Amino acid sequence: MNEKPIVSIITINYNQSAVTNALLESLNKVKSPSFEVIVVDNASGNEDHKNINTSYPFVKLVLSKTNLGFAGGNNLGYQYASGDYILLLNNDTEVDPEFMLPMVELLQNDAKIGAVSPKIRYFDHPDTIQYAGFSPMNMLTLRMHAWGFKEQDRGQHDTRKRTDFAHGCAMMIPRRVINDVGTMCEDYFLYYEEHDWSKRIRDAGYIIMYQPASLVLHKESISIRKDSSLKTYYLNRNRILFMRRNLKGVSRLVPTLYLICISIPKNLLVFLLSGKKEHLTAYWKAITWHFEHSVLHSSQKKAQN
């Protein structure tokens, strides 16, 4: 065990240099443990990356020639990471100065822990919880819910506990675990990739923990509008992709029947009757993508030391 571990924080910038700079400013107040920050610019337009504050000594700026999505951008950043622990952190967050050490100590003290996420509250409503762990996934709907979601934080979720899924907004993974299970699958591009990764981590025999002693504030929906057709496309495409990659036999048959008989007809009708043509088109493209890609070629990679 490294008594003085280094944490590599990876964050993705896409036309949000001001938001990314606010994160870097909050990270500058973090004193322990030692860390570096890899900012991956995902092919921002208008040379937005030139506005990122690289004056902090802990910042490494990596420029991607194309938009690799969430998984691809983080995987690219990982190639430049030197830390014992890898922390994926959304650029639309700001952190408590003491947020990092409790997660590191938790991982150092138990080799069975494969990933840990902090308590996440809303930046604009800092007394309101967004995430305090995830419930197990409903194997019919392929959805789960965040414990504590939109609850006022009165300390009711201040006990660390196991969870089936880490939160992609902020999740720390030991390098040795990534070497074991590989990096995130890039087939998703956006949404569900951290759920897929969490399941692979659990399938490899590790557990995932929620650490309430660590706090991150999330400026949710800066990157993607809540009513975005892009979100409609990727959430629905990738929910099915998660099923195809991770479920077999009866476990796959049941949610498939639910999708065909209930979920897909219902959603198509709702979008049609509400006049949301962009969402209707996006949803239909999400479904038909799977007919066009009947054979999956996984893009996850085994990490190299």
Image (tube, rainbow, N blue to C red):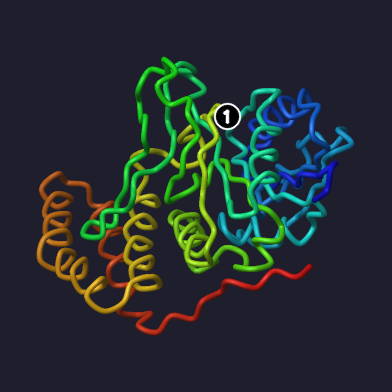
Coordinates of residue 165 in the picture (x, y in percent): 45, 50
- Describe residue 29's horizontal placement relative to residue 111 as left or right: right
Measuring 37% from the left and 29% from the top, which residue is drawn there? Answer: 148
Looking at the picture, tell me which residue is in the foreground, 285 or 62. 62
Coordinates of residue 276 in the picture (x, y in percent): 22, 47
Seen in the picture, residue 277 relative to 66 is either above or below; the reply is above
Seen in the picture, residue 130 relative to 116 is either above or below; the reply is above
- Describe residue 44's horizontal placement relative to residue 79 as left or right: left
Looking at the picture, tell me which residue is in the foreground, 208 or 239. 208
Coordinates of residue 208 in the picture (x, y in percent): 51, 49
- Describe residue 118's horizontal placement relative to residue 129 as left or right: right
Instruction: Locate residue 70: give its quadrant.
Output: bottom right
Seen in the picture, residue 239 relative to 59 is either above or below; the reply is below
Amino acid carrying label 1: it is: Val
Coordinates of residue 34 in the picture (x, y in percent): 83, 37
* Quadrant assignment for the C terminus: bottom right
Within 10 Å of disc 1 (Cα), the crowding (few <14, some 14-19, many 20+) is many
Seen in the picture, residue 303 relative to 197 is either above or below; the reply is below
The residue that disc 1 covers is 216
Instruction: Locate residue 152: give its quadrant.
Output: top left
Measuring 52% from the left and 63% from the top, which residue is drawn there? Answer: 205
Looking at the picture, tell me which residue is in the foreground, 276 or 81. 81
Measuring 58% from the left and 27% from the top, which residue is drawn there? Answer: 213
SS of the residue under disc 1: strand
